Amino acid sequence: MPMTKTEYQHPLMRAYWAQIDTRFPQVEAVFEDVMAEALAVLTREGIAAYLEAARVIGKLGRGVEPMLAFLEEWPSTAKAVGEAALPAVMALVQRMQKSPNSYAITAFLQTLAPVARRLHAQEQMGHYLDITLDFMERTTGSIHGHHTTFPSPGLPAFFAQAPALLNQLTLAGLKNWVEYGIRNYRTHPARQKDYFSVQSADSRAVLQRERHGTLFMDVERKLDLYLRGLWNDAEQLVPYSTAFDELRKPVPYYDKLGMRVPDVQDDAHGVSGIDRYRATLAHMVGHRRWTRPQIADNWSPFQRMAVEFFEDCRVETLLIRVYPGLRRVFLALHPQPLEAACNPETTSCLRHRMAMLSRALLDTDHGYVDADLNDFVARFHAIMEPGESERRDSSTQEIAALALSYVAKTRRQSDQFAKVHFDNTVVDYRDDNRHMWQFIEAGDEEESFDQDRKAAPDQEIKALPPRHYPEWDYNSQTYRPDWASVYEALHASGNPADIDRLLQKHSALAKQLKKMLDLLKPQDKVRIRYQEEGSELDLDVAIRSLIDFKGGANPDPRINMSHRTDGRDIAVMLLLDLSESLNEKVGGSDQTILELSQEAVSLLAWAIEKLGDSFAIAGFHSNTRHDVRYLHIKGYGEHFNDEVKARLAAMEAGYSTRMGAAMRHAAHYLGARTADKKLMLILTDGKPSDVDTHDERLLIEDTRQAVKELDQQGIFSYCISLDPKADEYVGDIFGRQFTVIDHIERLPERLPQLFMALTK
């Protein structure tokens, strides 16, 4: 169990605990574990801000839930969008606290991390917070003419649905969806709740209407593999929204924080959204490989624009040499301006000329007749493709000189006109070329983004960070993301001799089991010959080696052989419910259910070890969704030895049974095993429940959903229940995959037999 604050040995941990200034025992129970995650993610300044924010949230008067939600969610949030987003988050929390919507603070904080993982960037998070603030202010205190007493009816539902919505929509789409709900249901509380919980028909219709294009979050992994596999580049990808900058539409770019791309790409000009992403990334990779920064202090805007267009075409020409298929994509996405589209008598045609030139540099069939344009196209290709006798790589400096010549040759008085021709001149897959320029007068010093993200050695505290799992809400038929926090640890140790005595107590049963085990053991042994070390001597090879030795030749030392057993490939996870009810006595005896479980598990572990199957043992209990404890008793890499027996001997029962979260975490380990059959055995004495859940069906339905998830992963789950009332609910959870043991005293006998029946 976690230490109390007075037991913290590490002086930094005591200081951290003092800084948050709280008396909530629920926070104390998980504090060391959440700090382990925070110290692994946040900077020193970030840790101080994190603890101060937690202290403030703990003083809001909303109970322990907001504080726990923040402590658990912020490290993951900061990892996704950066710790610099914290002031904006806290500003919204303060606004909510000062409004009638303070009850929704917990819902906001609870979904913060899953929202951040979908947004990826601080800028995106800022837009999400703006949408939330606008929603809150426009739907608060406006029902039937009242102005001060009514909180926003749909706000908690919106927070609950936000992660799922951002799985389907861009921020622009989310903003439009929210705007429709506000406009139509601002004064209708019930219908507003239905809309923002995505229950009403028009809510789903607007959601479907706003879904378009290829979302970055859906193809992020593919794009990352594309960068690594084709270009050997592992830069971080960071999305931005195209819907919130009305003055200037954002364009791709890269800096020390990563490669910035739009959060959605529509299909265009016969090119799919994902291929548009690939074109953008390829273009930026080309600049990263071949472009060298130029000093720009003495160059005019026209000159810099020309250099950028020429350099863009240079890197794309080099990219096409590596992967010729890119030519089709680049040309499909590149605008093709009509030569007579701009009137130089009234309009600045500078961009129009540059767009035509850019098209001509890539497209041999461009069809333009302008003499200057064709002259510079020829000079460009002479630089890019010299004769074989003088084959060399072009350079940014060389192309820049060509661009400056083009400017000197083609400059016109009309280029200064205020009216500029923009139609069909934007090459939207290209980045903004900020990496190309250095300005001496402004200073070449670059900001350092590579700050230390790890705690110093003297700050490290031995604990594993929590893993957050979703939980199924059967009322809304949706997952609550990051709802249950699972903390794992190695189980404490006791006296292994206690387990040896239990095995000796059941020696007669063990003899009976051994006969059954011998029948279960695979008989199709495969002999492996020519081994220097093995289980027995290979006589044929040994005699031949002896003859060689007598004859003066070097004998073959591989005179042994061993055996491999084929035909049984099973991985097993035995998951033990260690809730408080295991301390109850069995019948009229002095023995508890926990003690009987120890005997049964010891016999089962002995039996599985004899069979040679890969197996692990873990126990779990919970004290609200914020504190699910998962205790490793035996790992897959361990034998059933004294260390494992010592952990079994120290088993203790307490708290509640949040079974779904424990099963999902156990599946994290079992799913990683390579085996033909994966079996999870759950030994429990009651139905799933926890002290923070008042609807008894909620955790039953969540565990049922967890069983379905495991089945989809190829994991067969089976429940052994010791609850005499289990027939009322266990079938709803496990279907036919369960056994109820009415006579608990027979558990040591029945448990190994059940395992053998399941794996024969």
Image: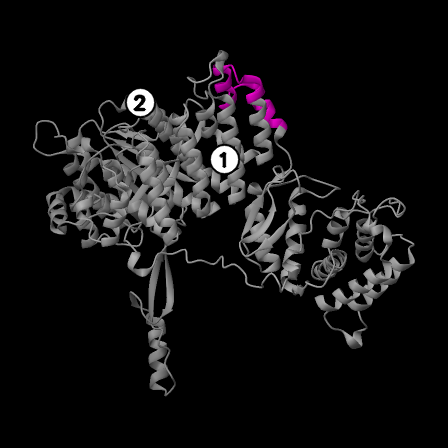
In which quadrant will I find the C terminus? top left
Q: Residue furthest top?
A: 144
Relative to 644, does residue 398 appear above or below in the rendering? Answer: below
Give the prevailing secondary structure in the magenta stretch. Answer: helix
Whole-percent x, y for residue 203 in the image = 56, 22
Mark in the foreground, 2 or 1 = 1
Mark 1 lies on a secondary structure that is helix
Relative to 77, does residue 107 appear above or below in the rendering? Answer: above
Whole-percent x, y for residue 381 in the image = 81, 64
Q: Which residues lie in the magenta part?
A: 182-209
Question: What residue is pinned by disc 1?
Answer: 129
Which of the labelled discs sits on residue 269, or is there none?
Answer: none
Q: Alpha carbon of mark 2 to alpha carbon of mark 1: how far?
A: 35 Å
Whole-percent x, y for residue 159 in the image = 46, 30
Q: Is residue 224 left or right of residue 608?
A: right
Res 315 quadrant in image: bottom right
Tell me if residue 193 is in the magenta stretch.
yes
Question: Residue at horizontal 41%, vertical 38%?
Answer: 90
Q: Amino acid at mark 1?
A: Leu
Relative to 471, does residue 73 appear above or below in the rendering? Answer: below
Q: Is residue 345 left or right of residue 387?
A: right
Neighbour tally class for label 2: few under 14, some 14-19, many 20 plus, Cα within 10 Å: few
Question: What residue is pinned by disc 2?
Answer: 696
Q: Is residue 336 left or right of residue 290?
A: right
Question: Residue at horizontal 37%, vertical 61%?
Answer: 527
